[in-house]
Image: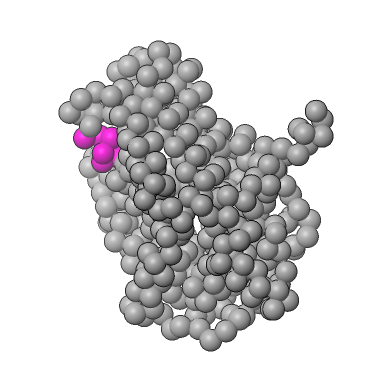
Amino acid sequence: MIARLRALRVDVTPLRTSRDFRLLLVAGTVFYLGAMVTYVAIPYQVYTLTGSNFLVGAIGIAELVPLVVFGLYGGALADHVDRRRLLVWTGLAQAAATAVLAANAFGAFGDPSVPLVFVVAVVLVSTSAMQRPSREALMPRTVRHDELVAANALFSLGMQVGVLLGPAIGGLLIAYVGLGWCFVVDIVGLVLATVMYAAMRPYPHRAETTPPSLSGVAEGMRYAVGRRDLLGTYLVDIAAMVLAFSVVLFPALVSEVFARPELLGLLYSAETVGALVATALSGWTARVHHHGRAIVLAAAAYGGFIALAGLMPSFWLVALALALAGAADMISGVFRSTVWSQTIPEAMRGRLAGIEMLSYSLGPLGGQVRAGVTADLWSVRGAITSGGIACVAGVTLTAVWLRDFWSYDTRTDEHAVAEREARAAAGEV
């Protein structure tokens, strides 16, 4: 029994075997943690300066186009330039932009300016969108091919730590030392993380690269759509997020259904807690080879638990259902990332990372709209439960349509075999 429990523990082998993976993981976690602190500070500042909920929401609208444009461009750029160098320069750009936010908050330019906050928010999302494809494309180069499942689980763990702790730290800083210090903390983290990126060894591209261009981006999109196994990972994620993502309804759920608004923070953190627990017990994932089936079953479970959350009679049962949904979503995410990192050729990895970033960035936005409209037309519980049921149906239909995705086996898939052989030929086992 003890041996079985030990086998469930998260596999930390990549941390022991790869110095560069440690640097990449810690730096990425620090970046995400600081970004979540600023994520809390910017809307709070805009609201306190204007009292307008519309302007708070307009921040997301302003960030949408830069997210799409620079996400795709950053992916194409990552397939041509030195990815480590791109991480460093975009990190420095984010630190400089955040310094402007800090100066604005402390009154260095006079009264804090709302238009300046919007401009800098656009700069931050642009540089972040350019950076992330390089980070994700570089990660597989830092570990052995057989360590990729564990590496993806650890990356997921780092992101969850940022999601859980960042907003809490931001809230405490705002309450006790002032909003400007949120940006100062973020700047310190950005500089430290950038130093870690600079300390990594170079990872030159294995073959001739494609200069960033619209045709290069289009080539990446054609590749993603042309591979049914990859297409399945994108469509399952989009289906889960658009159909079942219901975070926008949490305030109404605690206020109108349970009359316990003081418990709102627990709902926001429930999925993250579930994901953290699932990651801590993710050792079993390395023994799974049919990743397509694992993704489908985990995504369907996510929808099922969301549906249950809408039906549960008590707040605590709702929180439990959300925690289980977060665990299922984490498992789906680990296997999606593993398919990407084990099968996408080196020359295409940046562009595909940019496309992937769009799939999990735009999906939740669509989910918020769907949930809000459905709740207004029907009810809060109805919107949550119907979304979960629709997610199960959508994921199931995707698996039925994309048989190649459902039958994917990392041991025999032609793309996984080709990537293993390419890594072996390059001396990267």
Q: Position of residue 236 (x, y in %)?
A: 41, 48
The residue nearer to you, when weighing 162 against 234, is 234
* Residue farthest to the bottom, as pictured: 208
Q: Residue furthest right?
A: 2
Please report the residue visible at 60 percent of the width from the left and 70 percent of the height from the top.
Answer: 419
Residue 247 sits in which quadrant?
A: top left
Query: How many numbered marks appear?
Result: 0
Quadrant in which the N terminus appears: top right
238 relative to 131, above or below: above
Q: Is residue 43 visible?
A: no
Residue 230, picture quadrant:
bottom left
What type of secondary structure mainly makes up the magenta span?
Answer: helix
Is the image coloured rainbow, by chain, by secondary structure, or in one colour? one colour
Q: Is residue 179 above or below residue 91?
A: above
Which quarter of the picture shows residue 416? bottom right
Is 371 within the magenta? yes
* Figure quadrant of the C terminus: bottom right
Q: Residue at x 61, y 81 (%)?
A: 206
Give the x, y percent position of residue 249.
32, 30
Q: Could you tell me if residue 82 is visible in this image? A: yes
Point 35% across, 14% down: residue: 259
> What's the magenta region?
368-373
Q: Position of residue 272 (x, y in %)?
A: 53, 36
Q: Nearer the viewer, residue 211 or 4?
A: 4
Q: Is residue 136 above or below residue 365?
A: below
Horizontally, residue 27 falls left or right of residue 222, namely: right
The residue under the point 60% across, 57% down is 410
Image location of residue 155, percent across then percent down: 60, 52
